Image (spheres, rainbow, N blue to C red):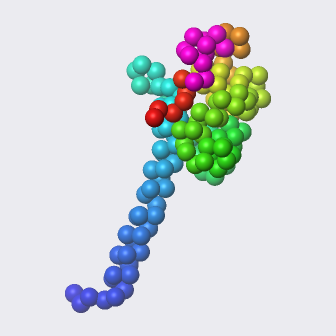
Amino acid sequence: MKFKPAHLLGLSTLAIAAMVLSPLANAKNGYRLAAQEQYKLLDKDGKGEVGCIYCHAGPNGGSSWNKFGQQLRDLYFGDAKRNVGDMLYLGLKANKDSDGDGYADVLEIVAKTLPGDDKSKPTKSVKDLEADLKKLGGVEIFKPKM
Ligand SMILES: [Ca+2]
């Protein structure tokens, strides 16, 4: 086969597409895994995996966020200075109730419910969850590891 410049162009286009697309996919999964780890959402058996719905409007992620995700996103580009660990921590430290269901985001993390979905609510009272959080060590336990 005779070498044609078009072959080279095709290959480099493929290589560039792979380079551009794969870190993007990993970065997105990275946010999800970072939240899972830093928010201590897996139980002892490794169950309770975080889905995209934790921060996004839909189950498959994409570019629309729920109110909790939007809050984190604003922090990412603001006070957290594009540091994912700081973003995740500051999002809870702000002590907001993103979905307006009566439970602060940090209490929903403790209860393992969705802080961006008002239909996902803890079964315990706010008072009991606050006591649980205090026993765990307070919001500081969600600080990023150095
Ligand atoms: Ca809430």
Q: Position of residue 86 (x, y in %)?
A: 57, 38
Against 94, residue 132 (above or below) is above
Residue at the left extreme, as displayed = 1
> Which residue appears at 71% of the width and 27% of the height?
95
Residue 58's quadrant in the figure? top right
Tell me the magenta residue range: 130-140
Q: Is residue 141 magenta?
A: no
Residue 12 visible in the displayed image: yes
Q: Position of residue 75 (x, y in %)?
A: 66, 43
Against 137, residue 91 (above or below) is below
Q: Main secondary structure of the magenta part?
A: helix
Which residue is at the front of the view, 78 or 124?
78
Q: In the picture, which quadrant includes the C terminus? A: top left
> Which residue appears at 63% of the width and 35% of the height?
90
> Which residue appears at 42% of the width and 19% of the height?
44
Residue 102's quadrant in the figure? top right
Against 15, residue 102 (above or below) is above
Which residue is at the front of the view, 89 or 116?
89
Instruction: Say whether residue 131 is left or right of residue 43.
Output: right
Q: In the picture, which quadrant includes the N terminus? A: bottom left
Q: Position of residue 6 (x, y in %)?
A: 37, 86
Instruction: Say whether residue 41 is left or right of residue 67.
Output: left
Q: How many marks?
A: 0
Which residue is at the front of the view, 5 or 84?
84
Which residue is at the front of the view, 111 or 132?
132
Residue 58 visible in the displayed image: no
> Which residue appears at 73% of the width and 30% of the height?
96
Q: Position of residue 16 (x, y in %)?
A: 42, 70
Against 75, residue 35 (above or below) is above
